[in-house]
Image (cartoon, helix red, strand yellow):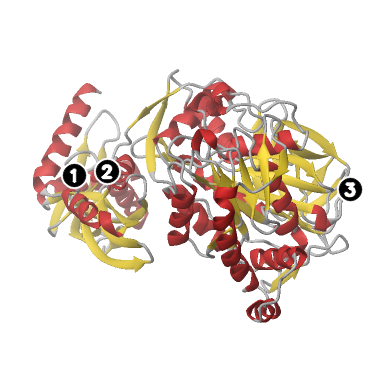
Amino acid sequence: MSEKIEALRNLALVAHGGAGKTSLAEAMLFDAGVINRMGRIEEGNTALDFEPEEIRRASSITTGLHQLAWKKHTVTLLDTPGDQNFFSDTKTCLQAADGALVLIDAVDGVKVQTEIGWDFLNDFGLPRAIFVNKLDRERADFRRAFEEAKSLFQPKPIILQLPIGAEAGFRGVVDLISRKAFLYGEDGKGKAAEIPAEMAELVESERESLIENIAEADDALVERYLEGETLSEEELRAALRKGTLERTFTPVLCGSATRNIGVDLLLDFVVTALPSPADAGPRKGTDPDSGAEIERAPEPQAPFSALVFKTMSDPYAGRLNIFRVFSGTLGPEGNFYNARKQSRERYNQLLVILGKEQKPAPGAGPGSIVAVAKLKDTSTGDTLCDEAKKILYTPVEPIPSLISYALSPKSKGDEDKVFTCLMKLLEEDPSLRIERLSETKEIILHGQGQIHIETTVERLKRKFNVEVQLSTPKIPYRETIKKKVRVQGRHKKQTGGHGQFGDCWVQFEPLPRGKGFEFVDAIVGGAIPRQYIPAVEKGIVESAQRGVLAGYPCIDFKATVDDGSYHPVDSSEMAFKIAGSLAFRKAAEQADPVLLEPIMKVTVIAPDEFMGDIMGDLNSRRGRVLGMENAGKNQIIHAYVPMAEFQTYAPDLRSMTGGRGIYRMEFSHYDEVPAHIAQKVIEAAAKAKEKE
């Protein structure tokens, strides 16, 4: 590795969709000479949004990576998605960053995904700065954006730059530490200028409060400042870096990405004040053999270790695993060990990702973000390491899925192909989940939202030429019994030659919810020979797969076979299996059968002011609120809600809360369906059966 670890910056751009992350990355790449003209989102020609689905929607759906050199530093940009549908990718890719830039739109202010992204940065302990963008737009207001950030965010935001001019007249920035103004022409290069006379007073008062804030990061500086000493620019910049890295405060810079105003100063700040991988310190993991906690220092001579944080799949190049090296060094080809899969992997080439292109890397050391193609066992979340010095890093969990759709292939008989191709997309996007439901015979795709699912379907067609239709998944209802009954199951059939004879008496009784099925053999005196008893059980189990009300599996009951008779010649396993099946059908009709529905445990997180609407809505969905708790500016509601009432909740919650509410849900238990609703389900099942 030629690059010194201190000269590396792994920088995540984080914000709500539309705040200008991709445009800012474009301006940075242009200023660094990586591209010779700035692309535009509207024209679909940016370096980081190149997937057809991104160009069509004019927003990032996956984290784009690119590299640039600035003042002898190498900066790797991670341009993360800002749309809630793709925000799980943002969370996963933050594992590779050492610092972040949080963008705030000067017109729209702080939006909900920016708040969620900020919380992720706090979870990861990442130092950051804020860039107030779009100051050239109508109704842009730097002060309003700053005050909103100050009221919402910790570590506290502090102003480092002030804008010169506003809206269409925005033309430059004042750096408060150096007391210099920079004006911008078309080329995006700041030219030093006099501070406008009308700003002189504001600059001085803002500089005073900035120095007070910066001095907080260094006790010795505070004392000197309070004694009235003048602090030098070098001392202030050193304290600014220290306070930023220790997360004492969050510096606020400003500009316009599309007009390339303030971007060069922002890059200067990134290389002078944001962390290198060395500043991030050792990474904690566990010893896969002993389970003990161990750590790896970001040093080239330490044992090699890395985390795979992203996978890209390409129908031609195959699979690309992208990983962040935490310790040690890799050559351009060689071997490493996958600690999670417990397998050895060989690679022939290291690659650096540059937007949609890749270039070979001569090697990789601590802080490097590189990719390798065609590993046999490796996927997102895996730890790669030195086999002699194993370590296992815990990857972050993807955001739980919120919405589910049933997929059916447009061409009959393509179910297996759909499933296989979806599994390949899952390698790229771990926030997708698929399952095959045996009782409804459906492939269910779970995702973050409607657009997430639709985009997956588009990619399925583009990458694998597989077309599918989406429909609302069927609810996996169940049936059970409420009364104890004892019935006879008797099967007698006389044909030419051997007949068939099986006869059993079985007692059926309900079990507590969630107990499943229990079978008891209570035969005494050989009323039914031993070898035929399992056949009775099998007959009951198979018959219970289609209940008597609406054809759903029957659960939570106990069957006790206690008597019967047999024929020495005509009895067989098949005859007793049929007898068991007949006993179940007869009992199910007599034992007060009822329909059960899946109940989900739901957690809704939203700002206080929406609580009334959310509670009312949950009640209208037959929800039962279990309790509420306070979480800063948000409230958390816990509730049980029937799955049948919750399939359209994602868009409803979004419109109720203006996109500021989020929820999670998981299956909890089965419960009885109210009679009037059960009747409708039973009638619908009968109609469907008629059609078959």
**Residue 99 falls in image quadrant:** bottom right
The residue lying toward the viewer, choosing from 556 and 162, is 162
**From mark 2 to mark 1, how far is it between C-alphas?**
7 Å
Label 2 CA crowd tier, 10 Å (few <14, some 14–19, many 20+): many
Q: Which residue is mark 3?
A: 331
Q: Helix, strand, or loop for circle 3?
A: loop
Residue 198 on image: x %, y %: 55, 49
Q: Can the viewer see residue 631?
A: yes
Callout 3 amino acid: Gly
**From mark 2 to mark 3, how far is it between C-alphas?**
62 Å
Label 1 CA crowd tier, 10 Å (few <14, some 14–19, many 20+): some
Q: Helix, strand, or loop for circle 2?
A: helix
Is there a contact, CB below 8 Å, between mark 2 and mark 3? no
Residue 487 on image: x %, y %: 14, 53
Q: Helix, strand, or loop for circle 1?
A: helix
Q: Can the viewer see residue 322?
A: no
Which residue lies most toward the top here?
Answer: 411
**Residue 582 falls in image quadrant:** top left
Identify whether 438 is placed above or below 339: above
Identify whether 556 is placed above or below 683: below
Q: Which residue is mark 1?
A: 585
> Which of the marked residues, 2 or 1, is nearer the chain's N terminus?
2
Is there a contact, CB below 8 Å, between mark 3 and mark 1? no
Residue placed at 60% from the left, 31% from the top? 49
Callout 2 amino acid: Ser
Is there a contact, CB below 8 Å, between mark 2 and mark 1? yes
Q: Which residue is mark 2?
A: 543
**From mark 3 to mark 1, how far is it between C-alphas?**
68 Å
The residue lying toward the viewer, choosing from 319 and 77, is 77
> Which of the marked residues, 2 or 3, is nearer the chain's N terminus?
3
The residue lying toward the viewer, choosing from 643 and 122, is 122
